[in-house]
Amino acid sequence: MLEDKLANFQKILGCTFHNTNLLIESVTHKSYINEKKNKNRKDNEILEFLGDAVLNLIISEYLIKTYPHLAEGDLSKIRSMVVNESTLSDIARKIDLGNYLFLGSGEEQSGGRNKNSILANALEAIIAAIYSDSNLNGVAAFVIRNFEDIIRISAEKKVSFDFKTELQEFCQRCKLPLPVYKVSGERGPEHEKVFEIELLIDNKVFGRGSGRSKKEAEQIAAEEAIKKLKMQNAK
């Protein structure tokens, strides 16, 4: 039954809809509408359009608050690593979104339930549906719950490339000892632990950093060390 299926999907999403028509619309592909010719039913393309904007706003705000030390260009690059078809379709599969789509028979037969584009678009439509049914805080909780890990991983990848690698190459070019990273302290509860890192070159502290992971703290320390070394070389 449709009601049972929708109830089960809402449990997976962790959201209870006041207006389940929004949820139905979010998982209705245009191929289904074209085939059924149901004038009372809408496809998810308008919701997808709205969901893209809502998702970018939430991710942008989260990045600014979580990584206040990063420049605008770095934040944009991390966001592009998070908000893309590949990531969205992966998250869609984790919540079994494909199983709840309404597809036309042609899309059904061609494997539409597992197509990256259809899954990614439907996830954005669901984000818009949650936003429309509740508010920005309500949908932000859903987004962060599902995107937080990939945001952290993407930030660590970007961070590692930007500063730690640059510092190592700088030291090699200038024939300096390679940097050593040491944990100088930890604070906060286990689920919100903050690591403090000291960066040493030739046993001298050139940088300090703190972050929610050791890698994040190391990149902050590396950025500080690069600035100090470049200033020294400029003299």
Image (cartoon, rainbow, N blue to C red):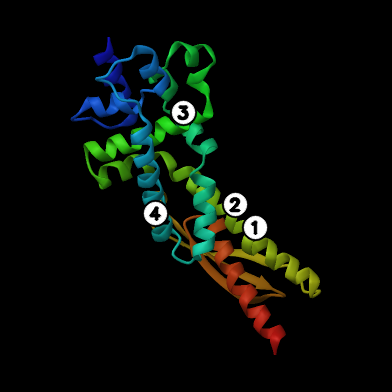
Q: Neighbour class for label 3 at 10 Å: few (<14), some, many (≥20)? A: many
User: Quarter holding the N terminus?
Assistant: top left
Marker count (numbered): 4
Q: Image point 40% across, 42% down: which residue?
A: 52
Q: Label 4 belongs to which residue?
A: 62
Marks 2 and 1 in Cβ contact (< 8 Å) = yes
Mark 3 vs mark 1, foreground winner is 3
Q: Image point 40% across, 33% down: which residue?
A: 123
Mark 3 vs mark 2, foreground winner is 3
The part of the image, by quadrant, that contains residue 206 is: bottom right
The part of the image, by quadrant, that contains residue 92 is: top left
Q: Label 1 belongs to which residue?
A: 161
Q: Label 3 belongs to which residue?
A: 119
In three-dimensional space, the C-alpha distance between marks 3 and 4, rounded to whole angstroms, equals: 23 Å
Instruction: Describe the element under mark 1 as helix, strand or loop.
Output: helix
Choose between 103 and 60: the one closer to the eye: 103
User: Quarter holding the C terminus?
Assistant: bottom right
**As drawn, 132 above or below 165:** above
Choose between 179 and 79: the one closer to the eye: 79
Mark 3 vs mark 4, foreground winner is 3
Instruction: Describe the element under mark 2 as helix, strand or loop.
Output: helix
Marks 4 and 2 in Cβ contact (< 8 Å) = no
The amino acid at mark 4 is Tyr
Q: Is residue 146 left or right of residue 223?
A: left
Q: Label 2 belongs to which residue?
A: 157
Q: Is residue 10 visible?
A: no
Q: Is residue 12 visible?
A: yes
